[in-house]
Amino acid sequence: MPLIHRLSPQVASRIAAGEVIERPASALKELIENALDAEASRIQVECLGAGRKSLRVVDDGCGMSPEDCSLAIERHATSKISDLSDIESLSTFGFRGEALYAAAAVSRLSIASTLRKAKHGWKIEVEAGKILSSGPAPAVPGTAVEMQDLFFNTPARRKFLKSDPFERGKIAAVVEEAALANPSLSLSYKSEGRTVWHFTPETAKDPVELLRQRAARVLGTEISSELLTIQAERPEMKLCLFVSPWDHLAATRDFQYWFVNRRPISARILQQALYRAYGGQLGGRHPICVGHLELPGTSFDVNVHPGKREIRFKSDRDVFELVSGLVASALVKAKPAAMLTPEPRFVRENAPSYRTQAASQGVLALESPPVEAVATPAGSPRWFTPPFRYIGQIEKSYLVFEACGGLFVLDQHAAAERILFEKYLGEIEKGRVRSQKLLLPLVVDIPASSVEKVLSQKQNLLRMGFEIEPFGKRGLHCLAAPALFSRAADLKELVHRLLDSLHDPLAAAEAVKHGAVATIACKAAVKAHDALSEREALQLLEDLKECRDGSACPHGRRTMLALSRDELARRFQRPGAPPL
C-alpha cells in the first residue's frame, strides 16, 4: 500500500480556506471587494459576535443570475479572468475565484442576489461547502451574503481567534480602508446592533480633495487637518499622499495606509521610503500617511498570496525613490528649519523644581538631604560612592558632583524618570494606584479600529489608574487618570502610544504596563532645562539610590556617568591619583 494518498475534498477545502479566510476581517475584505467589483455604490456591513456568529454584507451592485449563484461557491470559478495573461492587465479586486468558495467551506453561508431589472432573485444556502437549498427569492437589487458560525467545522482554527474587541478592531480597520480607498462609496458598518461608521459619498469635484475629505472622515479632523498634500504624476504612475509634518508625528504606526489602484496593500518598500524621507529625526515617533498610487497592471504583481494583501512592484527602486523624494521635498517646504537646524530651547520662567514635583507626586522627600555621607550605607548600589559634593548644572540638564575624589554626572531627566517609574510600577504591583477624576472628560479622537484596541485593554488600564469609556462613533472619553499624570496633551499622547502595545493580546498586559508606565514617568519627570537647586540635586541623587536599577531610565538611556580618581589621573597622564 502506498504511504502517500490524496486528501478528501472536504479536508482539502477546509485547509485551502485558511489561506483566504484567516479571521472574520479577512472574510469581510473579500466580500467588500466582490461588491466593489459588482459596481456597487452602496455597501452595508453588519456583524454579531465579532463576526464569529454572523457577518452580513449587502450591496446594490449588478447582482447574479441563478446559475452564477451556484457557480460562485465553486473553487476557481470567476468572472474576472479567462486566461493567465489577464492577470497582467487586472482591473478588478478579485480574480482567483476562491473568496466565496473558502467562506462557504468554513461557515453556514447564504447568498441572495438579483440581477438589475430582473423580476425575481435567487437564494442559495450552503453549509461546510455543501448546498442545502437553492430557489427563488424576492427581487431585491444587488447581492446579500451572510456568513454564520464561522469556523464551526474547524474548531482548532476558531480557537486561535483573538478576543472579541481585537477581532472587532480588525473588522473596523477593513471598513476604514474600504472607505479611504473609495470616497464616492456609501458605506455603513454596524457591530452588535450599534452603528460604528456611516459614510455618505463625498461631494468634492477635485479627485484629490475627494480623497482628503474622506481621510478627514476616517481619521478625524484632529489628525487630518495638519496633513501635507503631495501630488505627482509620472509616465506610468500617479501618486497622491497625505503625510504629517514634523510637528504632528504620531506615537503609533496605526495611522499609515497604502493603496495601489484602490487596493489596500502591505508593501515594505513603501514604508521604508516613507521613513527614509523623515531621516533619523523621528525620535521614536511615526509619520501619519494615507498614500494612493495608480499604476498599470503590468507594473506590479498582486498574485503573491491568496489574501492579495501583499504585492510586488516591477521596479522597487523607482517606487522607493519617487515616494521618498516627494515626501522629503514636501517636508522641507513645509518646515525647512526643522530639518536644517535644531529649534532653540528656552528655559521656562519659574520652572517647577524637583522638590516641588516630588512633594506633589508623593515621592518621599527628606527635610535635610545630606551634603556628604560619611560611609556607604549597607545595601546601597555599587555606583553610590559617597561623599558627594554638588558642583553645579551643565546646560541645566546634567548635575555634576565630586564623588570620592572623582567626577559623577547625573542626567536629571533620566534619573527623575527612573524614580517615578519605579514608584508608579510599585503602586501597580501592589494594586494601589492613586487615580484622580478629571474635572472634564478628555476626548481622544481616533479611528474606530483603534478605539476597539484600547477598549480591549480596559481592565488593564483601570488597574493602572485610567478610566476609559467609548465616546460617539469614533473616540474615547478619559474620565480618570493616575495622580502622577495630569497634563491633557500628555495624556492624549499616552493613549496613542498604547496602540502599538495592543496588537498582541497575549502579551498586551505586560507590554501595556511597562510601556505606559515608562511613558507616564517620562512625562511627569523633571525635564532637561529645569533649574534645580543644590538641595534638590542632592535629593534626586538620594532617591535614585533607592531604585532597584538606577543606572538607566525605563527606556534604556543611561542616567549617570562616573570618572574615578584613578581614571581622572590617567586621562591627565599622571602616574597615579593624588592623595586626598
Image (cartoon, helix red, strand yellow):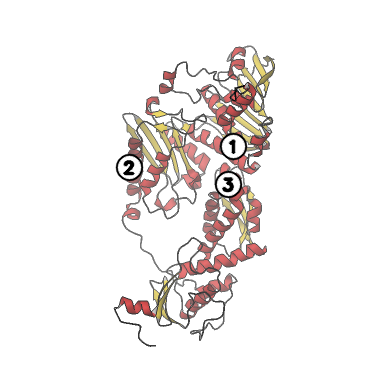
Which is more N-terminal, label 1 or label 3? 1
Q: Is residue 63 left or right of residue 579?
A: right
Q: Secondary structure at mark 3?
A: loop
Q: Is residue 275 visible?
A: yes
572 w.r.t. 303: above or below:
below
How far across and how far down the image is residue 11, in percent? Answer: 63, 26
The residue that disc 3 covers is 504
Contact (Cβ within 8 Å) of mark 3 with mark 1: no
- Could you tell me how far apart the alpha carbons at marks 1 and 2 are, in whole angstroms? 34 Å
For the C terminus, the image quarter is: bottom left
- Could you tell me how far apart the alpha carbons at marks 3 and 1 are, in whole angstroms? 16 Å
Q: Amino acid at mark 2?
A: Gly
Q: Secondary structure at mark 1?
A: helix
- Judging depth in this view, the residue of 193 and 311 nearest the camera is 311
Question: Dot 3: few (<14), some (14–19), or many (≥20) neighbours within 10 Å?
Answer: few
Q: Nearer the viewer, mark 2 or mark 3?
A: 3
Which is more N-terminal, label 3 or label 2? 2
Toward which corner of the image does residue 237 lie, by quadrant?
top left
The residue that disc 2 covers is 325
Contact (Cβ within 8 Å) of mark 1 with mark 2: no
The residue that disc 1 covers is 171
Q: Amino acid at mark 1?
A: Ile
Q: Is residue 487 left or right of residue 237?
A: right
